[in-house]
Amino acid sequence: METRDLPDVLAIENISFPNPWHETTFRGEIQNNDLSYPLVVIHRNLDKVIGYIVYWKIREEVQINNIAVHPDFKSMGIGEAILGDVIEEARAESVHYISLEVRPSNTAARGLYAKLGFELIGIRRNYYSNPDEDAIVLGMSLS
Ligand SMILES: CC(C)(COP(=O)(O)OP(=O)(O)OC[C@H]1O[C@@H](n2cnc3c(N)ncnc32)[C@H](O)[C@@H]1OP(=O)(O)O)[C@@H](O)C(=O)NCCC(=O)NCCS
């Protein structure tokens, strides 16, 4: 992800989430080279961003902080490809553990995470707002 990708990224973010990340958050992730890995999927012919993921790598752990696919390109395997690549990259870099949070109501994301092998770690009560919801914490051991 680069600064020039932000209009496309924000358009996807704003339709995908009730509490979307602000532009300054994405800018912060782009600048936070030590910790953050913000990646985009670009449609070759359209030359626009159709998906992205933002994750942090802290020592041997990866935390997935954001993932979204443009609604026009959902259910085509793009989310699985992005997250699958991150898992492979993490494995290659000797990461031991990957974690993330998801709304219980987010059937699509939960389906994706289950397919890739994430398992239930626990529940964070009242984690989300708009609407209020717990967070399901999922994790995957790579070692
Ligand atoms: C979650 C999201 C990234 C999935 O991306 P996608 O590109 O549409 O997903 P894929 O086509 O790669 O699907 C991979 C697997 O995920 C699961 N999945 C995807 N969409 C699903 C749906 N609507 N219902 C149930 N399972 C679904 C399936 O297991 C699917 O495998 P299959 O095609 O063999 O059945 C996408 O729906 C999205 O951007 N949602 C809005 C943002 C969001 O909620 N992000 C996650 C926050 S925790």
Image: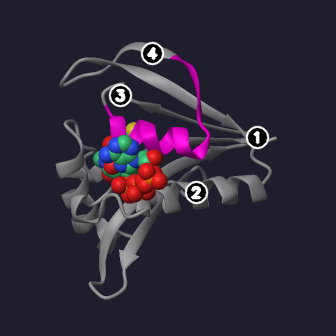
Is label 3 within 8 A of ligand 1 (CB to nearest ligand atom)?
A: yes
As helix, strand or loop, the secondary structure at mark 2 comes to helix
Residue situated furthest top in the rendering: 125
Residue sitting farthest toward the bottom: 45
**Which label lies toward us, 3 or 4?**
3
Amino acid type at circle 1 is His
- Of the numbered discs in the image, which one, if any, rests on residue 124? 4
Residue beneath the point at 31% across and 68% down: 50
Left or right of 127? Residue 37 is right
Q: Give the Cα separation between the discs numbered 3 and 1.
A: 24 Å
Q: Name the secondary structure under disc 4.
A: strand
Q: Which mark is residue 84?
A: 2
Q: Is residue 123 left or right of residue 48?
A: right
Dot 2: within a 10 Å radius of its alpha carbon, few (fewer than 14), some, or many (20 or more) residues?
Answer: some
Q: Which of 77 and 83 is in front in this view?
A: 77
Q: What stretch is highlighted in magenta?
A: 106-122
Front tag of 3 and 1: 3
Residue 96: numbered disc: 1
Q: Residue at x 75, y 46 (%)?
A: 95
Quadrant occupied by the N terminus: bottom left
